[in-house]
Amino acid sequence: MHCGIGYLPGGCQRTMGLHCVLILCLFTSWTAGYKQGENVTLFVNKVGPYHNPQETYHYYTLPVCRPEKVHHKSLSLGEVLDGDRMAESLYHIRFRENVDKKTLCQLTLSEKQVDQLREAIEELFYFEFVLDDIPIWGFVGYIEESGFLPHSHKVGLWTHLDFNIEYNGDSVIFANVSVKDVKPVPLEEGAGAAVGGVGVGGGSVTVTHTYSVRWFESPLPHARRAERLRDYSFFPKTLEIHWLSIINSLVLVVLLLGFVIIILMRVLKNDFARYNVEEEGGCDDLDQGDNGWKIIHTDVFRFPPYKSLLCAVLGVGAQFLTLATGIIVMALLGMFNVHRHGAINSAAIVLYALTSCVSGYVSCSFYTQINGQRWVWNIILTSSLFSAPLFLTWSVVNSIHWWSGSTQALPATTVLLLLGAWILVGFPLTVIGGIVGKNRAGSFQAPCRTRNIARQIPTQPWYKHTAVHMAIGGFLPFSAISVELYYIFATVWGREHYTLYGILLCVYAILLSVGACISVALTYFLLSGEDYRWWWRSVLSTGSTGIFIFVYSVFYYRNRSSMSGLVQSTEFFGYSLLTAMVFSLMLGSVSFWASLAFIRYIYRSLKMD
């Protein structure tokens, strides 16, 4: 059984149709057992520069052995988004049957094709094959730089591959490819010399591609074969560093919580003792001869400007909080098979469409509470706040991929599918959520009345300005996730498989806790200066974490990676900017609701005898 976009299983076509693709086929994988001597199909997938993981091209764009008619494998949505373009190969591999140096094909390469291979090898092109959903990686060729005077520059092509396949019973457990004890065929600059043992002349050369297959029995059952692939990567070796980063972040959280709970509550206790007057009177009588946060009680709940934009930010932020929590929980439940390419991409798209109702509900509900009148415009703004920048960024990145011939350029059918998912699912759910939120919205619960005339705000010292609060409020949450952020970047912009979702959940909880704590503290300092403009300030204070994340992405690109070129750079910075925007929306939403709960608490605690 295999679920894909091009070809659907008969049961899916007859019963569930598109729902099968979006729910069942994206997250499940079932492979029948093999019999002795049964054919095991090896798919060729893509090639690309080793240091530019997102710059990939179809394997058959290189002058390599290929069938007369190329048959492509039907792919899932996540695989297409991941740049996969799997096609059947000429390799004949039979279950548990060894093969010793079998000829794949003999190619006559023109001078232009030799130069193409040399350029690919010099750019450290690697290839990716797929055998029974197991990725196999290897380099196209070999390059050697030696000596200074005289300088030696040698480029060689691997024309023989050794496939090492592990099995248990009737299942394939693991596979890789090696070139141990194999000599590369030299590719001389300017064809004409004999290559692979046969010279043709006339500027062309001949190479003979061969392969061997070795089967090894493995004690690992099929249900645990993902562990074999995980252990093959370098990522799990950083587990100890992960726990050190968690301990470092936990210490930061404890210190912040201690600051907010002990110090801030002690200050509030003194404030309550000073502000709670003995005489009878309402909340309007509390501004006689006092200063600090109590004196602005008639202005602190004055509704802010740009209500619709604020509510849209809160709604989309709540949507991404729901989406991120859902992805992490699904990963912890083992719903993402490491052998299924792009499973998380598929889940993210489906959840983004389904959680659109959350953004519409939260945005329109709060917009109605703060006396917003243009609720239709609010729903449109909420639905396009993130989708519009996403579409613009994707258009630029996809155009550059299309221009360069990269497999990362999405085909028209996939583009129509994604557009249809947003038009038929995402946008209608946003509208439905908005209507429900508008109808179920109650009144805004403010402990104190707001006067018609706004109070004049005194001049604030420099350390209470917005830029300073953004620097403080953004740096602390960023410092809590900075170490883990490196591993996430190495996974997203590399070829590692992230499997430590328990640690990711801890870091996620720490991030939200730090954002809420620092927001409450900064809001208290703002109100103590008799400045009641906390609405947007609370969003911007920890929402500025996105700026630090984007700056870190620039640092990662320049100092922690070897990425280069227009194609890779455009995709990296384009999607890094969107990632920073997502973090800003999530943390801005958490910050706002934490500040609102805190303000309601302190003003409700004032005695109004």
Image: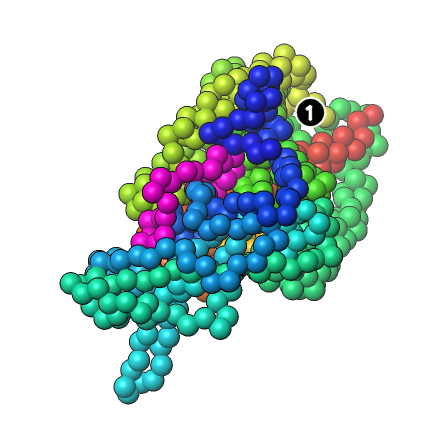
**Residue 588 percent coordinates (x, y):** 58, 39
- Prevailing secondary structure of the magenta residues: loop
Q: Residues within 10 Å of mark 1 (few under 14, many from 20)?
A: some
Residue 178 in the image: above or below residue 337:
below
Q: Is residue 327 visible?
A: no
Quadrant of image for the C terminus: top right
Which residue sits at x=43%, y=31%?
414
User: Quick one: 544 or 559, which is closer to the camera?
Assistant: 559
Q: Secondary structure at mark 1?
A: loop
Measured as percent of width and height from the top left, residue 498 is found at 61, 52
Q: Nearer the viewer, residue 360 or 607?
A: 360
Residue 176 image offset from top left, x and y in percent: 55, 58
Which residue, as the protein is rendered here, is positioned at the far top? 439
Along the line of sight, the residue nearer the viewer: 360 or 474:
360
Q: Which residue is mark 1?
A: 446
Q: Is residue 277 above or below residue 118?
A: above
In percent of the image, x 40 and y 28: which residue is there?
413
The quadrant the N terminus occupies is top right
**Residue span colored magenta:** 60-85
Q: Confirm whether residue 210 shows in the render.
A: yes
Question: What is the tally of numbered marks visible in this picture?
Answer: 1
| 89 w.r.t. 392: above or below | below
Residue 9, given in percent of the width and then of the height, sits at: 56, 26
The amino acid at mark 1 is Ala
Say whether residue 333 is left or right of residue 424.
right
Left or right placement of residue 443 versus residue 47 in this view: right
Q: Is residue 168 magenta?
A: no
